[in-house]
Image (cartoon, rainbow, N blue to C red):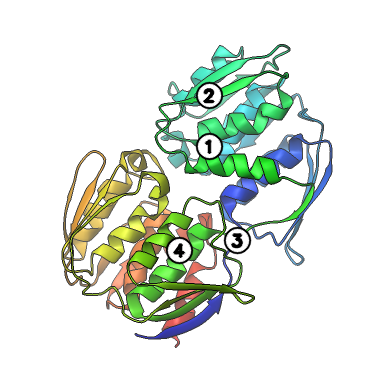
Amino acid sequence: MENINITTKVPTSKSVLARLMILGALSNEKCAFDNVSMSKDSENLLSVLKDLGFAVSFNQGTGRLKIQGNGGNIPKREASVYVGNAGTAARFSVAMLALSDGEYMLNASHEMSLRPMKGILDTLRSAGAIIICTEKEDHFPLIIKGKRPVSPVKLKVDVSESTQFASGLMLMKGCLPEGSVIEGVNENRNSYIKLTEEVIKNFKPRMNAEGDISSAAYCYAAAMLTGGKVTVTNATLSSAQPDIKFLKLLQSFGGEFLEDERGLTLTCERPIVGAEGDLTLDMSDFSDQSMTMAVLASVRKGTTTINNIGHTRKQECDRIAALKENFDEIGIESEIGEDYIVIHGGTPHGGFIRTHNDHRIYMSFMLLSLIVDGIKADNPTCNSKSYPGFNDFMSSLRQQ
């Protein structure tokens, strides 16, 4: 396959939408967000808000999400909620409930129950919340007996495992007493914290939701593999989403972006396949695309080292280990360490991709199916977590 030419639309940014949903629920306003599409993660957070008693509704046909704010209060003082496998829903909900007056039971998927929570739980306990881990300490499931501060508080949170810990607290700041301070400790990855700041600063009760740059990255990576053009109608280079840095990385590999009334178009005249030269990349700030970059690196000539991604070992799966496992399967040599992977580019062959139910492992490796025969995967629907339309996008490319 070569010289593709396709125009597509990606889902709403689940990262931005989650922040808008929390801010809307905590506001005093009747909020309406337009151009919304729901990923599985977004649906999980919407269900959490409903179970907590907030008046919320989503019209899939019009793409309008309505949330009636409740002035910083949780409508139900007692409730049981399920956050699924959504890190944003999990961390944001915990912050919101622990800093309010009520008692709540929080359950999660098996995968989410394996992910770290210690940083934010320690901080919330220091603010007076009682949090009981019913199975494994510092992990879901949880019982939270919240306590809303009545005087200014200084909340220090260790974000070395997830910046979502700080973002969840930042979204609550408007409900805390004036003079309260939130401080991130061990903050070595700050793009999502900056995104939270931007969403809070620009929040309006009525606004359009932003397209997901993380999803658009897979579309543009497809063009880098095959050559040709991909236009994403709801992407923009001015986005504050961290994965915009991946798009700029594609520019350094020869992709050319043009933004106009149609959207954001990447043109790749010379595919990345066979490109020469060794690379060393620090992807700590946009690690969700480290898997996409690793797959692109697998078809280059030379060695690519991706550093400072150790935190991805504690996300949907151990992503560094999953990369090596699947590179072994398709004949690409790689080495891994605690926080890095080294990929020796070559000619991958077909194989069976083990996704570990991780949407980003699946979508990254399935991009190779555009140029490599025999790439299959064990869970071809796990993309629904963030990009439900990914498989349709890939089918459209294959039909060209």
Expressed as whole percent of the image width and height from the top left, the position of residue 298 reads 23, 65
- Which three-letter amino acid code belongs to the residue tagged 3? Gly
* Mark 3–mark 4 distance (CA, rounded to whole Å): 11 Å
For label 2, the residue is 183
- Which three-letter amino acid code belongs to the residue tagged 2? Glu
For label 4, the residue is 217
Tell us which disc is closer to us: 3 or 2: 2
Q: Residue at x 55, y 79 (%)?
A: 7
Please tell me which residue lies in front, 273 or 135: 273
Few, some or many residues within 10 Å of mark 2 (<14, 14–19, 20+)? some
Q: Residue at x 67, y 39 (%)?
A: 48
Few, some or many residues within 10 Å of mark 1 (<14, 14–19, 20+)? many
- Give the vertical position of 285 relative to 144 (above or below): below
- Which three-letter amino acid code belongs to the residue tagged 1? Ala
**Left or right of 144, for residue 266:** left
Q: Earlier in the sequence, mark 2 or mark 4?
A: 2
